[in-house]
Image (cartoon, helix red, strand yellow):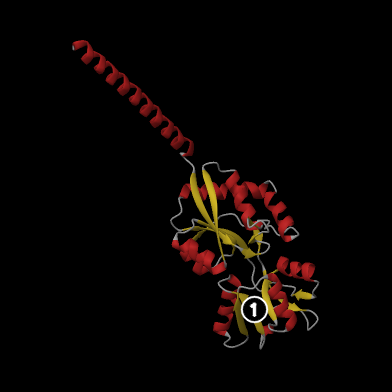
C-alpha cells in the first residue's frame, strides 16, 4: 500500500515537474517573442492617395510618390520605428493628423499661421514651393501678380496654402476674382484651364513643368512668384520628441547625401530641392 502511494506520488511529481518545465519554456518563448518586437514602435503616417507625383496608389495598389518614398527612406534608417501609411485627400490628411490617427503627415505642406497653431513642423525643407500664377499661353500673356487676376476664375485645391493666400488677398480686395475649389488631379486641372472652366491656377514651377511635359500644353507662369515657400512634413502636437528628432535628423542626412535630390529628379523631373 505504501509502495503504491509512493509510486503514485512519484508519478504525480514527475508529471508536475514536466508540466512546469513545459510551461516555463513556453513563458520563455513568449518573452523572447516580446523581446524581438520590443523597442519597435509603429508610427502612422498620413499622406495622399491620388495626388501624382507626390502621394498616390500605384498600379499595384501600393503607396507611391515623392512624399511616400521619402518617408520610406526615413523609416528604413530607423529600425526602432515601423511606418504605416494612411491615405486621403489633402484636407483628410490634415484631419487625420490633427485627430491623432497619424503622428506624421507627409504631403507637401507649406508653412502658414493656421497650421503652425495646430501642428509641429519638421525642420528640413525638402521641396521648393514658390507659387506662381499658371495660365494658358495660347489665350494670353503670363501673369505676375494677384492684381492681374481681376475678373478671372482661379482654381485652388481645398485646404492648401495656395487657397489660403488667395483668400487673404480677397479679404483686402473683395470680389477681385473668383476662387474655384476642388480636389482635381493634374489632368483635371489641365482640362479646366484648356476648356476655360477656369482661367488660372496657383502652383509651383515644377507643377507647370509637368503640365507642359505630360500634356503638351502651352501653359505659362510669370517671372516672379506671388509667394515664396518650401514644403515640410508635419507632426501631431503630441508626437514623441524622440521620434521628431530621429525623423528630422534622418531627413537632414537624406538631403545631404543626395537621396532627396534623386527622388526629386525621379518624381518631379528635375532639381526642386531647397538649397537652404
**Which quadrant holds residue 228?**
bottom right
Residue in front for this viewpoint, 129 or 107: 107
Question: Viewed as shown, does residue 250 lie left or right of 270?
Answer: left
Question: Viewed as shown, does residue 51 lie left or right of 99?
Answer: right
Label 1 neighbour load within 10 Å: few <14, some 14-19, many 20+: many
Q: Which residue is mark 1?
A: 155
The residue located at (67%, 47%) in the rendering is: 256
Q: Is residue 163 visible?
A: yes
Provide residue 216's location: percent of width, then percent of height. Answer: 81, 72
The residue located at (60%, 76%) in the rendering is: 182
The residue located at (75%, 73%) in the rendering is: 223
**Which quadrant holds residue 140?**
bottom right
Q: Quadrant of the N terminus?
A: top left
Provide residue 212's location: percent of width, then percent of height. Answer: 78, 70
Provide residue 243's location: percent of width, then percent of height. Answer: 50, 48
Q: Is residue 123 above or below residue 98?
A: above
Amino acid at each position: 500500500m505504501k509502495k503504491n502511494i509512493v509510486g503514485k506520488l512519484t508519478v504525480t511529481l514527475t508529471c508536475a515537474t514536466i508540466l512546469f518545465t513545459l510551461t516555463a519554456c513556453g513563458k520563455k518563448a513568449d518573452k523572447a517573442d516580446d523581446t524581438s518586437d520590443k523597442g519597435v514602435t509603429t508610427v502612422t503616417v498620413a499622406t495622399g492617395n491620388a495626388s501624382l507625383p507626390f502621394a498616390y496608389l500605384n498600379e499595384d495598389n501600393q503607396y507611391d510618390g515623392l512624399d511616400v518614398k521619402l518617408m520610406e527612406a526615413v523609416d528604413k534608417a530607423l529600425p526602432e520605428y515601423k511606418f504605416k501609411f494612411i491615405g486621403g485627400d489633402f484636407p483628410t490628411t490634415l484631419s487625420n493628423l490633427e485627430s491623432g490617427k497619424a503622428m506624421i503627415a507627409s504631403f507637401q505642406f507649406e508653412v502658414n499661421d493656421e497650421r503652425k497653431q495646430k501642428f509641429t513642423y519638421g525642420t528640413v525643407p525638402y521641396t521648393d514651393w514658390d507659387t506662381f500664377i499658371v495660365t494658358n499661353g495660347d489665350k494670353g500673356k503670363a501673369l505676375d501678380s494677384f492684381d492681374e487676376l481681376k475678373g478671372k476664375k482661379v482654381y485652388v485645391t481645398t485646404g492648401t496654402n495656395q487657397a489660403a493666400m488667395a483668400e487673404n488677398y480677397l479679404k483686402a480686395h473683395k470680389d477681385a476674382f473668383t476662387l474655384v475649389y476642388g480636389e482635381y488631379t493634374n489632368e483635371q486641372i489641365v482640362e479646366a484651364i484648356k476648356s476655360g472652366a477656369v482661367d488660372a491656377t496657383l502652383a509651383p514651377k515644377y507643377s507647370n513643368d509637368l503640365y507642359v511635359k505630360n500634356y503638351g500644353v502651352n501653359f505659362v507662369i510669370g517671372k516672379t512668384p506671388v509667394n515664396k515657400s518650401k514644403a515640410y512634413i508635419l507632426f501631431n502636437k503630441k508626437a514623441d520628441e524622440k521620434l521628431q528628432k530621429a525623423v528630422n535628423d534622418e531627413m537632414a542626412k537624406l538631403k545631404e547625401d543626395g537621396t532627396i535630390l534623386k527622388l526629386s529628379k525621379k518624381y518631379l523631373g528635375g532639381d526642386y530641392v531647397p538649397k537652404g
